[in-house]
Image (cartoon, coloured by chain):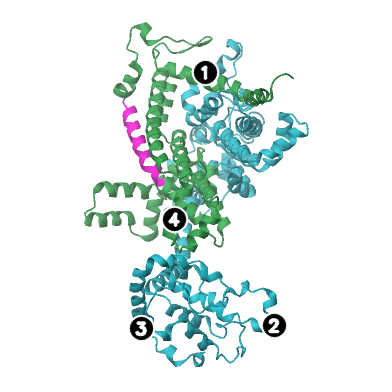
Chain colours: A cyan, B green
Amino acid sequence: MDKNMSPEEKKFTLEEIMAEAEAKRAAKRTADPEAPAVTTAPADSDVPQTVTPAAPPVSRPTTHTTANLIPQAVPDPQAEPEPDTAQPAEIIPDPSADEAEPAEASRRPLSDPDHPVSDHIPDCAKPDVHEEHHVGEGMSKKEAMRIRMKNMNKQEIAYLRRKQIFEKCWPVFRFLILFGLGFVILTPLMFMLSYGFRENADMNDPTIIWIPRHLTLRIMKQTINAMGLTRANNNPLINTLVLNIGCSICQVVTCAITGYGFARFKFKGRNLLFGIVVLMILVPTQIISIPLYSTFRNFLFGTVNLIDNMLVMYLPALTANGIRAGLMIFIFRQFFRGLPKELEDAAYLDGCGPFKTFIKVMVPNAASSFLTVFLFSIVWYWNDYYVASSFFTNTKTISLVLKNLDGILNIEIFNNANANISAREKIVWLEAGCLISITPMLILYACLQKHFTEGIERSGIVG
Amino acid sequence: MKIPYERRKSLYGYGFISIWLIGTILWFLIPLVESLCYCFMDNAQLKPDVGGMNKVWLWNVGQNWLTNFKYAFAADPQYKQNLISVLKDTALTTPMILIFSLFIAVILNQEFKGRGFARAIFFLPVIIATGPVYNIINGNIATTGADSGAQFSTLFETDIVDQLLEFLGVMNISAGLSDVINSVVTNIFGLVWSSGIQILIFLAALQNIPVSAKEAASMEGATAWEYFWKITLPYVSPMILANFIYTVIDSFTKTDNLVMARVLDKQLDWDYAYAAAMAWSYFAIVMVVVGIIVMIINKFIFYEVE
């Protein structure tokens, strides 16, 4: 392609460009105040113009002006002999814009010279498709880039170079960062998988760190038995599921109703009451657990003892006061506030009462938000052990069992004379227990990952 | 149907929140007030009794009404140390979590291959970190010497952290800074694992940045660095506040919170008045600090819609 270049083009070495750019910039610094005026205009103008009106009065060498771009490209053998009349207009504003404002250069992609503003020409103005080619055609991208570079000053070139380097390097760094941190996050999972399926004897082998020598399901089975997951009555898994799903459903429904009440109705003391919701988020459960215990112990003026009854979880959930209920009310309120008011007005006009409106109009619109809050609720109930440990004595949940796994294992497995198990070997059972207890959540997460991560955006917690 | 429309609507409003209101009074407000009262009751007599707690006000038995707080801060062997270490820890990790999660959220908001997979991994802690699993694993990993700092040491056969700190020492940078770095590096596991929700919230905020702001910035030729400070940060600033509060609140419920562990110990010893005093003073201190910080941050927050 070099043969297409006029000889005067070639003499421009980088030093010359730099020197010239330096001069140009110095001149521009004085003329700077007018410069911003032209920043946007030239790029869109269809009007043929060879001189930009507000271009700073720079003493550029004529060989290097924009005019010189055209003759250099026209001799292109493949090019159409007589270019479209609109063409000079298309190409000229481009470089002139570049020198009018350094920032202007950066916003145009590097491959841009091949596709100037020809889109602006109405179809009738270009009768033949073959005439549509423009000045930069026939040059390689590199070539076009070099020509463009000549019209830039040092800052612009430096900017582009920096940008290029950054764009090349960043993905590598990003990968390293994400890989490293992802490794840190996945370490516990790999740890569980690696330790949960090995013989406890492997723990005493210093050559084994990650890959077990004796794969086995024995430890898993023992742990499942010890945790009571195979028991017929008071099975922690069934207890947890009953509590978890039931409470989550109750809580989501009641929290949604409350959130809607706060979002859409004006009543006296609303701000004060919402302050209580915020207080519910802030106050840790530990503070109220003792009086709550005494409330449940002497429920209905001391006639009923609710301790160790699942009602201690269900009653608060039914009245929108379960685990992290404040946060859920807050999320629902934010979400319902974001829905358009016209939805309800339409329903009211059609004769719906407020509750019917809520069920028929608002709930279907909030489906994604419901799902997100429900999923989080399930996770929080699954992971909760504080409330469970405060109010349950015999009823076991998974997280309760897991919290006391060390003691349970001591009783169930290590409690005989033959068992000579070191603390280090116990880790195998502990990890097996962890793996068992989080597997349902992992499966849930794997299946509904999109709803976990994208639901929160749609649920309107932001905004 | 003689009630005016506005009035009727407000009544409906009460109707919608009534379920919650009943529950809150029963399960939240009454216990809250009661627990506050426990702080000022005689510890020796505050024991479960038939039909509720046996409550005796401190001033009825001729004691100073601050006796329980005095016990907590002066007599209890562990409370004060635990409180100081937890507060220090929170003060250190909260900004780290915020910076870290914002950084990760910015990265996860970019377009690249495998973004969905990366997101799935980074949100994984959300479902696990709140449970007891985290503690057990953390302990076990430390026992087997597979925890992060040591792990990298075995991977690269040199202790990078120590070498780095040595280097800092050579450069004569204060010991305090190297302490901070050391605690951050050794705690990278905890840091990553406790910022799942924060990343999620920041990511949601990032996706709410209007396209027009992005376009304007790229028109003006903003670099990524400038873009972050001039566009990203102002737009996510309300969420920085929200995340800050969330992080602090989250530290209350963390299973390894020493103060709360101490409070639980006291409860198990039937020292309910002491436990209440400890929990409330911890809560009050944290809330005062949070309140001050929130007021300060509020001045720098950019709200798009007033």
Residue A144, position as x, y percentages in the image? 50, 81
For residue A355, above or below residue B29:
below
| Distance from Cα at disc 1 to Cα at disc 3 | 82 Å
Q: Quadrant of the C terminus of chain A?
A: top right
Q: Which mark is residue A128?
A: 2
Across and down, in percent, residue B109 comes to: 52, 55
- Which residue in the protein does label 4 denote? B228
Judging depth in this view, the residue of B283 and A329 nearest the camera is A329
Image: A201 above or below A321? below
Whether label 2 touches label 4, CB < 8 Å: no
Tag 3 subunit: A
Q: Are marks 1 and 4 in contact (CB under 8 Å)?
A: no
Query: Is A363 in front, or is B234?
Result: B234
Pointer 3 and pointer 4 on the same chain: no
Q: Is residue B200 visible?
A: yes
Number of other residues with Cα within 10 Å of mark 3, as a class: few under 14, some 14 to 19, many 20 or more:
few
Tell me the distance, in whole angstroms, between the alpha carbons under discs 2 and 4: 46 Å
Q: Which residue is mark 1?
A: B30
Residue type, numbered disc 2: Asp
Nearest to the eye among marks 1 and 4: give it: 4
Query: Of helix, strand and loop, which one carries label 4?
Result: helix
Please give the range of residues in magenta: B77-96
| Distance CA(mark 1)–CA(mark 4) | 47 Å
Of B163 and A371, which appears nearest the observer? Answer: A371
Would you call the spot at circle 4 few (<14 residues within 10 Å), some (14-19), or many (20 or more)? some
The answer for which chain carries disc 2 is: A
Label 1 is found on which chain of the structure? B
Mark 1 on the same chain as mark 3? no
Q: Position of residue B203 (x, y in %)?
A: 52, 50
Which mark is on residue A16?
3
